[in-house]
Image (cartoon, helix red, strand yellow):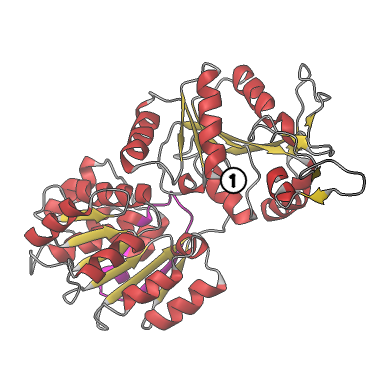
Amino acid sequence: MSFEKFCFHPEIMAGIRALSYDDPTPIQEQGIPPVLEGKDVMGLAQTGTGKTAAFGLPILQRLRQGERQKVRALVLAPTRELAEQIHEAIRTLGKKTRVTSMTLYGGVNIRPQIQLLKKGVQLVVACPGRLLDHITQGTIRLSNLEVLVLDEADQMFDMGFLPDIRRILRHLPRKRQTLLFGATMPAEIRGLAREILVDPVTIQVGEIAPAATVFHAAYPVQQHLKTPLLLKILRQTPTGSVLVFTRTKNRAKRLGEQLSKAGFQATSLQGDLPQNRRREAMKGFRDGSYRILAATDIAARGIDICRVSHVINFDVPDTAETYLHRIGRTGRASRQGDAFTLVAPEDEGMMRSIEQLLRKPLERRTLADFDYGVPGRVWGGSSRIASTAGNPPCPRTPKYVFFGARKKNHRQRNPFSRLSRH
């Protein structure tokens, strides 16, 4: 089946050809017809399967005619990076049309967004928080909305956006077309779908499983040796672009700095970065200026870079499904990819869940020339180990302090001692 069978306007077909789209993917083949017919759709498919075009092309077909100064289509996305990627894909597909669009997300000045909204746009791609800011300030009107898309709805739930989404829904016309897409559908999202979708067409493409082109391996290691092991792996392994996932923002930032100091072309991507720095990190990673990107799970979706050769889980993810999203950044477009996971002893339980989801055990690897017996640093009079990838150990704090003259049996517990040591 070719895109010609959907009978898109020639201006839209020009955008399809400009992106060198050949045959539609399964989610596009099954999703485009009901969206063109104006039906509500619930689509379940992994990231990287072409969901953006599945809803973006029919929206462009609709917006070619009718009002051009009012917001008629709204796409909600969980992260700024994904919002930018969706907007850029739809903008490129509709380059020959006169459809106007913009993004709305936080971390940037709100005034230019207000000015663009005053001029009038037809399509808005937004993150929930900033959209609510505009709704509260009365700078966006959604009374003419015809199509609502919730993209990566499961990730929005994971990030705590469900209350914001419910608030947004109260400001939208009841009569509209609603499209809901996700890689997984937890019970909460299915409940939301029952509330907001009317007689939806349900589309599920494939199983929630990793690409067959990805090789998986686990590297057992003590927590305090993760950073030196990562450096060793990177020095010994031929790679293209490498995504390194951490569990926290601070660790992503710190790891990016450590990799850079070690001589790698590396940077970090995490939620505390200003938007201009986030754009710079993404641009540099895409064009090859940075070979390694240390990131939190905001990069687990929304990054479509075909040459990511390796995904390395510096921290084991919190859920097995998140593992699939992370390693889905490699092995794309039929290319081979590698997924390495550094596994501390306390991570073994989650690794069993991941292996159960993958339906196979992960190969355990060790490096022959790496010293796994290096002890961690001990501080504070306890047996806790300082991680070389974490913060430096706190100065040793005495369990008791003395006030006034030091007298036998007249010691007083320092009320801040517990706080100081943690």
Determine whether, in the image, residue 92 is placed left or right of residue 207: left
Q: Nearer the viewer, residue 137 or 118?
A: 137
The spot of residue 31 in percent (x, y) is 36, 65
Closer-to-camera residue (414/328): 414
**Mark 1: secondary structure:** loop
Q: Residue at x 44, y 76 (%)?
A: 193
Question: Range of the magenta residues?
Answer: 32-51
Residue at 37% over, 50% down: 82
Question: As shown in the figure, which amino acid type bears the numbered disc 1?
Answer: Arg
Snapshot quadrant of residue 232: top right
Q: Is residue 7 visible?
A: no
In this view, the residue in front, 332 or 121, is 121
Q: Per the image, is 66 magenta?
A: no
Q: Name the image quarter holding residue 133.
A: bottom left
Which image quarter is the N terminus in?
bottom left
Give the residue displayed 15% in from the left and 64% down from the top: 63
At x 50%, y 75%, the residue is 190
Residue 300 in view of the camera: yes
Give the answer, above or below, for where 411 lies relative to 226: below
Q: Position of residue 172 (x, y in %)?
A: 26, 77
Is 45 part of what is drawn in magenta? Answer: yes
Is residue 316 depicted above or below 129 in this figure? Answer: above
What residue is pinned by disc 1?
247
Task: State the image coordinates of residue 261 (x, y, percent, origin top left).
Answer: 52, 19
Q: Position of residue 284 (x, y in %)?
A: 36, 29
